[in-house]
Image: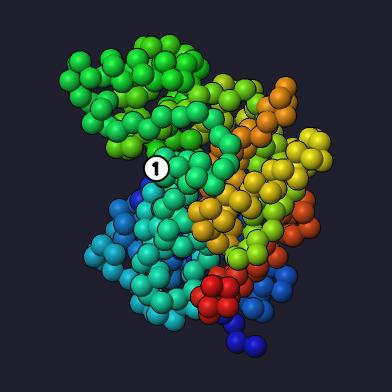
Amino acid sequence: MEKRRVGLLFGGCSGEHEVSIFSARAIARALLESENTSKYELWPVYIQKDGIWQAGETARQVLESGKPQETSSGRSLWEFPPDMEKIDVWFPILHGPNGEDGTVQGLLKLMQVACVGTGVLGSALGMDKIAMKMIFARSGLPQVKYRSVNRADIWSNPCVFPKLCDRLEEGLGYPCFVKPANLGSSLGISKVRSRAELEAALDNAATYDRRIVVEAAAIGRELECAVLGNDRPKASVVGEITYKSDFYDYETKYTAGKADLIIPAPVPAEITAKIQEMALQAFAAIDAAGLARVDFFYVEATGAVLINEINSLPGFTATSMYPQLWAQTGVSFPQLVDQLIQLALERHSGKSQ
């Protein structure tokens, strides 16, 4: 059987460049394990922080070292390295803006080649927290109260900004969270408890994005569920995240020992079933494909389950929640990578349209 050439696309121009390299290293190892070695040929393609695409030895060195390539080769921006047309299926593991927001998905679609994961529409909806919440609301998925804000309202004249803060205090109260709408991995997020903190958090979030979402704080346990499939997806067991920091920020998420993942989560069977059902609803609502991780709040006192967000391209290291959830469900890391590639090929062929 002829091997499929898998273009592992990683790095990128976002603030999650290093996270992307870690995910790519894990996927590369999985492609060299068990039956995958006879089915796939790894073609690493690395996007530098300046947007230059690199392949061959340069990309392999970044995978091996785990360190970004800082220097340019003189290639023009977005000029493809040689032989890219020979790739059979792309596995983009670019986290954050330009990687999971539909941008690179659109590029790969124009190339008319199979691509792992969600397409343009679902990626864009999954990335923009305001659009995502609007879709969830239309789908009947319960969530925390929120308000959307534009940068122009924050960086406005001294009369407008105080009135904006008044409306947020009245509608959401404290504590609340201020988040850029289009960043992942908790970048730019602040938990605020006072007017002064709210003003500072809004100003900070506006430096990251022109669209900002402000959410009421949910007092509940943080549970997550992984989804795998195309038109008939399946949900994994449910996991729980616990931590001692004030909230699940970037440092807590990516520093060893700062957070604990409990799989399966110790919750009643009916809560697990409800979360799995809601995860599949969210997956369908944004028209996701291949993979997604869906995050929830479980309020034990009332039994309420609130959807927080869907991540159409979650972290993919061996210790990330998404692959760990599937490992506990009976799908090993190499099997998971294989299934995702097969799902991409299936969707590209039109069999799952």
Residue 322 visible to an observer of this rendering: no
Q: Amino acid at mark 1?
A: Asn
User: Residue 274: horizontal and vertical position, in percent?
Assistant: 72, 43
Position of 92 relative to 185 (above/below): below
Position of 91 relative to 279 (above/below): below
Residue 254, image quadrant:
top right
Comparing 326 with 42, the one in front is 326
User: Residue 14: horizontal and vertical position, in percent?
Assistant: 38, 47
| SS assignment at label 1 | loop
Q: Is residue 285 left or right of residue 14?
A: right
Q: Which residue is at the far left?
A: 157
User: Residue 293: horizontal and vertical position, in percent?
Assistant: 60, 49
Identified at 51% across, 58% down, the residue is: 287
User: Residue 352: horizontal and vertical position, in percent?
Assistant: 58, 73
Residue 214, image quadrant:
top left
Q: Is residue 3 left or right of residue 298?
A: left
Q: Quadrant of the N terminus?
A: bottom right
Identified at 69% across, 43% down, the residue is: 275
Residue 143 visible to an observer of this rendering: yes
Q: Return the residue at label 1.
A: 182
Q: Quadrant of the C terminus?
A: bottom right
Comparing 348 with 169, the one in front is 169
Identified at 57% across, 56% down, the residue is: 284
Identified at 60% across, 70% down, the residue is: 343
